[in-house]
Image (cartoon, grey):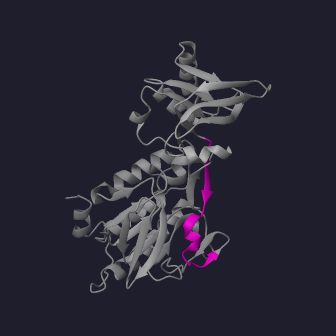
Amino acid sequence: MKKTDVIIIGAGPVGLFAIHQLGIKGLDAIVIDNLDKVGGQCIELYPDKPIYDIPAVPECTGEELTKKLLEQIKPFKTKFFLNERVDEVKKDNENWIVNTNNNNQFSAPNIIIAGGVGSFEPRKLSLKDAEKFEETSLFYAVRNKEKFKNKNISIFGGGDSALDWALELSKFSKINLIHRREEFRGAPHTLSEIKKLEKEGKISIKTPCQLSSIEGDKNITSITIKFDNGKTEKIETDYILSFFGLIMKLGPIAEWGLNMSKKTIDVNPENFETNKKGIFAAGDICTYPGKLKLILSGFHEVALASVECFKRARPNEKYRFEFTTSSKTIQGRLGKK
């Protein structure tokens, strides 16, 4: 079991800023997120979309904001557990025990839920037989590209993820890029590169069509696709990569006994604690009178929650508020001289 001062659920901007606010108070944290990278909604939903409500930053993208937050928390050397979902939370005296789907177990007096509007999960193939091939021949994310070397890969999707991985994996594998529409939604430059590789015979584009069946026993051997004109084609396939976007689910959080209002968590606006002592919620997932769903609001919420976290993690120490401009202790933690 891994012990820490605070378990943060969610690696979006609010979760990242929570690390900073806890770190300058001398508290250690670990972060758990269901996605394969940090950034939350900013990275998954609008990495290139301008954000205008960050103080002193007239305009930045979701990706730029994430990079700056990561730079800000670098001194705290926080450990991230990505591609991981919290399945169970249970009380153990003054601590909370968290169990994940990867069989990790954590213990801390505090939990901060900064999960945006819930966890992101891939939109799965609707084909009945697809599920039995998941994590052996069918994947919704690429965790280790070496696994896909020198294989026949069928990639489904029309957005950036599908195009980016088609481009990358075409360096050493045969790629079929399959989309239900003629038009792709990805970046024009990437699409241009894909078209070049199609002419060179390194990528085969199949549109407009959809998956009709999957053939194979323990592993996929081939797939059949059906075009809009009714024609079918069988394609030799070792792996399917499916990128149909993400859906947002509240997930196991709904079962933790927290007071809920319309899929959001009720909190005390004095410290953003839920009805469970030591469990806090911040960002879009929490609600209270006057709540505004802004990244700015989430930053304020974790700043106040971190004070209560300190009191619970250090019950024998008195919390003393200090400005970062004047505290040598804080400047030391940030690596400043």
Give percent across and percent down for residue 134.
54, 46
Residue occupying the far top of the picture: 200
Give percent across and percent down for residue 259.
60, 79
* Quarter the C terminus occupies: bottom left
Q: Is residue 18 magenta?
A: no
Write the residue at 27% across / 69% down: 326
Decide: is 222 above or below 142: above
Residue occupying the far left of the picture: 337
Q: Nearer the viewer, residue 24 or 242?
A: 242
Give percent across and percent down for residue 35.
49, 52
Q: Which residues are magenta?
A: 244-260
* Residue 59 visible in the shown view: no
Number of numbered discs present?
0
Give percent across and percent down for residue 262.
68, 71
Decide: is 289 above or below 18: below
Residue occupying the far front of the picture: 217
* Residue 231 visible in the shown view: yes
Q: Nearer the viewer, residue 290 or 152?
A: 152
* Quarter the N terminus occupies: bottom left
Q: Nearer the viewer, residue 45 or 69?
A: 45
Horizontal side of 143 relative to 293 (left or right) equals: left
Horizontal side of 82 relative to 229 (left or right) equals: left
Write the residue at 49% across / 45% down: 135
